[in-house]
């Protein structure tokens, strides 16, 4: 193929490759529009800024009841993941810190330890089997979708991990908050969990629940 | 963990659990907005009323040509199923009642008999094999997606069933209505079904078709 | 089209419609082979028996700790649903009976009340909001995938419901069993749920947990 | 980057790019193993022959009852499409030829006319609306999943089209065959279609049905 | 069933078959509204025109740098495929024409040769194996999702093919255009492809790239 | 509920909760069996070891042509991700190290920088737009499925990142290897990429290609 021929026919190129102008490679969320079951409608105009995010760079504040912080980069924080079926969060665990028992209704989780020692586990629904591992720097662990799991700092110093999810918004349901941090009547909690009412009232007091 | 510590650090909790406020657990349909291939956009504000529905509580009127009634709770009737991939309908079959041959283009079906005796069948595309069963109270039967099937009351009294679908809107195409209750020319129906024109015209007359 | 012509050309028909013999309309589970992420391999030979099931016809035994019984027709019990993305279970609730707090990791749920009065609720992960409804005969309610929910008999006599799922095996994780019916150390349960150790030990005793 | 450096470090390359050896880019069907809901297990060893197929090159025999032939390249004929979610078939329509009313339970269809004039239509389940078009060479038409549709030669000479499907095995259920080419009792066909028994018996005779 | 009964009860029919009016069988794209990850919102009112398209009937102009033309019927050109998971394009290859090395990020491809001789190939990521075939009229070939592939006219006269995709918008990324037809700095192209800077600058000149 | 009652009815519990024993919460790959389109068949017996992996803990060897190493934990290395739709890899980039231009045919990618400074970019198929960002520790960036992208160390010291994928095996196709590290004839590479034959032969020499 001659260069001359190339140059001469360049003007004809755009017309030939008409499909080029119409491809939708991604769908950065327009959070101002109502979501749909598949995610948010797509923003019209995007830049490289839409595909990167610095919100996980700073450590979360672990001076709290759980000695830990979860900093998500789900679709609401990081609209670039909209429609791509994955997201990420940062876990900071102070000494003794705990990510309490929880599940993600809409996605499996993959954890990688960056610093410190973390013990993690999940509970299968088959015979309620517990799968428990102590992980060090560089280790990874997977938590299948929807199953109860937890992580806690089992080392001496602080610990850091990143957790990826197979969904743009995996959800997060912390069992203790679901039970004790709302207006679900104490009697109902007792009836559906076998817990004593005194225990329930005590934790409702701590976590801010009523009834 | 001391209760005091818990109480003291309570103020810090909201900030730590930032992901809590952003989760989209469900997507109740806003039927006033255009649908998308994944369903309707999500309503902004929901209550428990959005997740329950009483429209299937009353028996359908079976005093009609088929001696039967189908009462659906698909997304259009029950917006709470939007995005969840399942729906339900109530089948009332008077004595001799029939749900005519039909298919659901977008979902498999699971029937449970609540009252009476129902004979149901579906036709596979492999050698046109017929799978036929007579079902009594408490029996269930599954009808694979897109295949022609039917149900009829094979007992003496009325019959009742609930049918679930693996789609928020499975669709419903009744073969006789598709053939005889529209303006598809008689000649075309004959050509594509082998039926006699006299038969077609007769049923067009009964069901309200033209041409 | 003449009947004669039809009859004469009949012999040629099989050759023309060659695709007929090769369609896979369904995939009844062969439970003797290892499952895959999409379900079980398909049985070679099937009959109408494979698509119907009588295992939900009899009431479950509710003379137990929860005064209730869950009788599933998931893929393992009813291989006909394999690959079809839906399944069903029967809920029997004696007077005072309760289906304890639980979630289904892999599917949303749709409940229809057949007899009695059932109060049901689920807990969203957004602000831990509780969605609670009392349902009577014929009412339906939907429980979005992966969220904690419960049902209990709030009437005087026995209650019966059928629950459909948008998965051939939705899973079932009962929170109290996950916490107290295994060998997860009491200290870990306390650390990840805020529950008192005495409470945990008491319920481990009741439900058969150790450690 | 110097060429020397490139050459020197070549030996180290294989170790670095370890993921290269493990990728599963495709999954050509091993038809000797049982299928699963997601398709057939993958063949171990493949060649370029597995991804191409000449079975659609020859015209189908249209000397038959419908004056037409459907030649499929679904997974069973063309194992290379396994797991890829698409397939194709060749339609030959002699003068007056008809592809009778049918549906594909598991995939939408896209037709392109290569030769002749074809009139095609599908019937929606909304008000049984008919969407009908006469297509010439180069025209395309789409038939949404699971809906009844048909094609016939509306020109003078033979016609040829290729139809693609959004499934490796879309299925094919021809309405007339489902009704009249099996052992479904005449009484049942009548009850579920409103057709006269005489009409049914006549077509059972023609198409080879019994009962 | 008597005809009289049929006629008498006809008035009751509409009420009974209430689900009929609410089915969403398809979702023709409304291109004036923002897309979502599952496609465009659905047009309110449709006709048969929305499901057919004549834009592929005319040969593309092959008097250009590649001696070929790709004419797509993706969702942007043919809104009827929205939500249906398939689309099509027309390939015209003049003598010596080439569809340059490219991939489709979001769908597998199935090619059927209509005229001429086409040599096609794709490159697997396993050991970079090349699968290469020369195809004649009526032959088909499949190109698995996301893999690099190409087609070129290996006969004497012009060639024509249709390519179907398992996505309503498969995307199209031509490697040479991605490398040389934008403002990606020459140094970066060299660093990430091992190509010489002189080669890169030459092709940037030909294809219209800068930097 | 009295404790006595609880204890007395304990024996009845197992029978009631029959679904507990049949749930399939996960599907750890049995790599000895043939894969299917949805992944590998499930291992019969699993332990906590199956859900964790230490293979990413050690830095990859970056003394090679690209000054970088990719260490994957896809299904083949880490069978615990089978069926869960996500995986991860470790990127080590020595000073000046580069992950060459590549794409993942089957999944989007999410990168988090753990150490150093990484410049990353991807190329859209719309007008071949380049999205380029320089990322520091804690920054994340997303790369939409199937699009060409690259990463290189733009800092002084070594750099480390983890990349998650929305697929258990996203695939990896390095453009330079696909072009120059196989037996694809030089003439064909030239024809389909516009590269000069001399350039192609040079890189085939470096990377080990033939023809």
Image (cartoon, coloured by chain):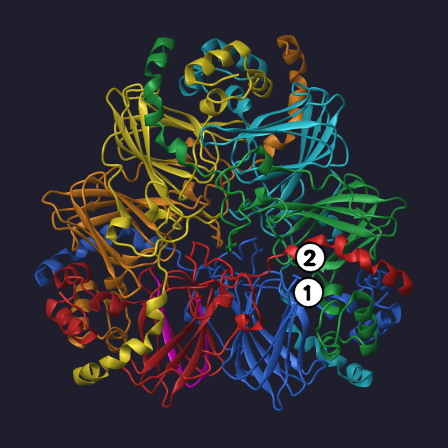
Chain colours: A red, B yellow, C orange, D cyan, E green, F blue
Circle 2 marks a residue in which chain? Answer: A
Disc 1 to disc 2: CB gap under 8 Å: yes
Task: State whether residue D167 appears in this view.
Answer: no
Decide which of C178, E91 is in the foreground and name it: E91
Asked if E27 appears above or below B45 in the picture, the reply is above
- x and y percentages locating residue D174 in the rendered image: 56, 27
Q: Is residue D18 left or right of residue F180?
A: left
Residue receiving disc 2: A20
Q: Quadrant of residue D185?
A: top left
Q: Is residue D64 left or right of residue A186?
A: right
Residue at point 67% right, 57% down? A21
Tell me if residue B5 is in the magenta stretch: no
Asked if F28 appears above or below D28 in the picture, the reply is below
Residue receiving disc 1: F128
Q: Please provide the residue range marked out in magenta.
A: A109-124
Magenta stretch, main secondary structure class: strand
- x and y percentages locating residue E24 in the rendered image: 45, 39
Decide which of F208, C139 is in the foreground and name it: C139
- x and y percentages locating residue C32 in the rendered image: 46, 48
- x and y percentages locating residue C123 in the rendered image: 26, 60
Q: Residues within 10 Å of mark 1 (few under 14, many from 20)?
A: many
Circle 1 marks a residue in which chain? Answer: F
Secondary structure beneath dot 1 equals loop
């Amino acid at each position: 193929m001659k260069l001359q021929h190339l140059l001469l026919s360049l003007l004809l190129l755009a017309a030939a490759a008409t499909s080029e102008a119409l491809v939708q490679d991604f769908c950065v969320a327009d959070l101002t529009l109502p979501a749909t079951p598949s995610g948010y409608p797509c923003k019209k105009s995007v830049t490289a800024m839409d595909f990167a995010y610095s919100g996980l760079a700073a450590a979360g504040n672990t001076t709290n009841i759980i000695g830990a912080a979860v900093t998500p980069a789900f679709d609401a924080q990081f609209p670039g993941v909209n429609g791509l079926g994955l997201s990420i969060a940062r876990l900071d665990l102070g000494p003794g810190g705990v990510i309490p028992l929880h599940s993600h209704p809409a996605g499996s989780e993959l954890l990688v330890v960056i610093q410190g020692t973390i013990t993690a586990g999940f509970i299968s629904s088959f015979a309620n089997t517990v799968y428990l591992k102590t992980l060090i720097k560089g280790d990874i662990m997977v938590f299948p979708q929807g199953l109860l799991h937890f992580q806690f700092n089992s080392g001496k110093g602080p610990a850091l991990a990143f957790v990826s999810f197979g969904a743009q918004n995996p959800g997060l349901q912390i069992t203790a908050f679901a039970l004790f941090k709302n207006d679900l009547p104490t009697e109902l909690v007792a009836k559906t969990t076998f817990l004593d009412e005194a225990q329930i009232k005590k934790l409702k007091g701590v976590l801010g629940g009523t009834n």
